[in-house]
Amino acid sequence: MQPQIDTTSPMLPHPFRVLDTREEIPGCTTLRVEPADGTGECGFAPGQFYMVYVFGHGEVPISVSGDPAKTGELSFTIMAVGSVTRALCALKPGDTIGLRGPFGNPWPVDKLKGRDVIVMAGGLGVAPLRPSIYHMLRNRDDYGDLSILYGTRQPQSIVFPEELAEWRDDTRIEVDVTVDNAGHDWLGKVGVVTELLKPRTIDQANTSVLICGPEVMMRFSAYALLDLGVAAENIYLSMERNMKCAVKMCGRCQYGPFFICHDGPVFSFDRVERLFKVREV
Ligand SMILES: Cc1cc2nc3c(=O)[nH]c(=O)nc-3n(C[C@H](O)[C@H](O)[C@H](O)COP(=O)(O)OP(=O)(O)OC[C@H]3O[C@@H](n4cnc5c(N)ncnc54)[C@H](O)[C@@H]3O)c2cc1C
């Protein structure tokens, strides 16, 4: 008798073929993939992630960085920091990977309708936010003022620079960029991303903010926004913890009373603020 495989199991990776790869900045690559058999599911909501399996190396959570309206393919933007992400960044067109997902809470783009939205990104944190930007631009009339505040270490580490330039030229959205350090050839702003909040007039009651970046950047951004009168429940962060199963079983991504894979990765700040004050959670 043939063994029965439960093809609907959330633990079963589905084969996807690499369509193309693009080095965004040194060590950071975007993979565009499609279902290997042409029929697999590609759906996701902005902010969700997949478990990405590189055969022979292992499996890691990676957020979708592409356009949610492109239903036949998925994009992932990956920083090579260890063995699995290095193997992902070394893939070539035609290679096969396994995907499970999508998993996790998305950015609440429907709840934000009618409100001003500030997207605050630090470094590679712009990748998980990018689908929400595509979505809000596509449905531009549903939102109030839209702005992207982007901060990164240096000019050479700006991820998606051409796209940021396109959005900067787009009258429907405001883009402001800053870097921590720069040489004399950089004509833009220098300073941390929270500096970009200072000159802004924020409609406290009608503004929501989506933040993704290193945890320290999210912490300082959230507190700067509280100081400006934005309510904690209108500040959303995407949290990262290492995980294995992504289906609330292994406990690896436990964050206080939450599992990042199931209750996150997107949380409103009022839900997690007290955990930000606890060391090594
Ligand atoms: C929900 C979610 C979405 C993510 N989205 C992306 C993405 O879009 N692009 C991307 O490049 N990465 C993303 N990550 C992080 C990515 O999963 C890790 O970089 C990856 O698991 C590292 O695996 P590795 O085998 O390459 O390195 P490892 O050898 O496992 O780790 C290398 C180093 O990175 C640290 N590390 C590993 N995982 C994490 C983590 N989750 N948070 C902080 N430090 C970690 C380790 O402590 C170690 O110092 C995401 C993580 C989560 C939880």
Image (cartoon, helix red, strand yellow):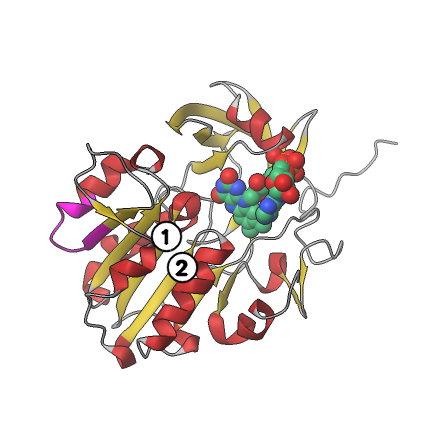
Expressed as whole percent of the image width and height from the top left, the position of residue 246 reads: 65, 51
Magenta part of the protein: which range?
A: 167-176
User: Which labelled disc corresponds to residue 121?
Assistant: 1
Expressed as whole percent of the image width and height from the top left, the position of residue 230 reads: 34, 76
**Does label 2 point to a residue whose CB lies under 8 Å from ligand 1?**
no
Q: Quadrant of residue 198?
A: bottom left
Q: Is residue 123 above or below residue 216?
A: above
Say whether residue 222 is magenta. no
Query: In this figure, which residue is indicated by the disc labeled 2?
Result: 211
Frontmost residue, 272 versus 113: 272
As helix, strand or loop, the secondary structure at mark 2 comes to strand
N-term-proximal mark, 2 vs 1: 1
Q: Quadrant of residue 179?
A: top left
Given the image, on which type of amino acid does mark 1 rest? Ala
- The picture quadrant for ligand 1 comes to top right
Expressed as whole percent of the image width and height from the top left, the position of residue 253 reads: 67, 55
Left or right: residue 217 versus residue 139 is right
Frontmost residue, 55 versus 196: 196
Q: Is residue 228 above or below residue 110?
A: below
Expressed as whole percent of the image width and height from the top left, the position of residue 50 reads: 56, 44
Say whether residue 174 is magenta. yes
As helix, strand or loop, the secondary structure at mark 1 comes to strand
In 3D space, how far apart are the residues under numbered discs 2 and 1 (Cα atoms)?
6 Å
Disc 2 vs disc 1: Cβ atoms closer than 8 Å? yes
Frontmost residue, 250 versus 17: 250
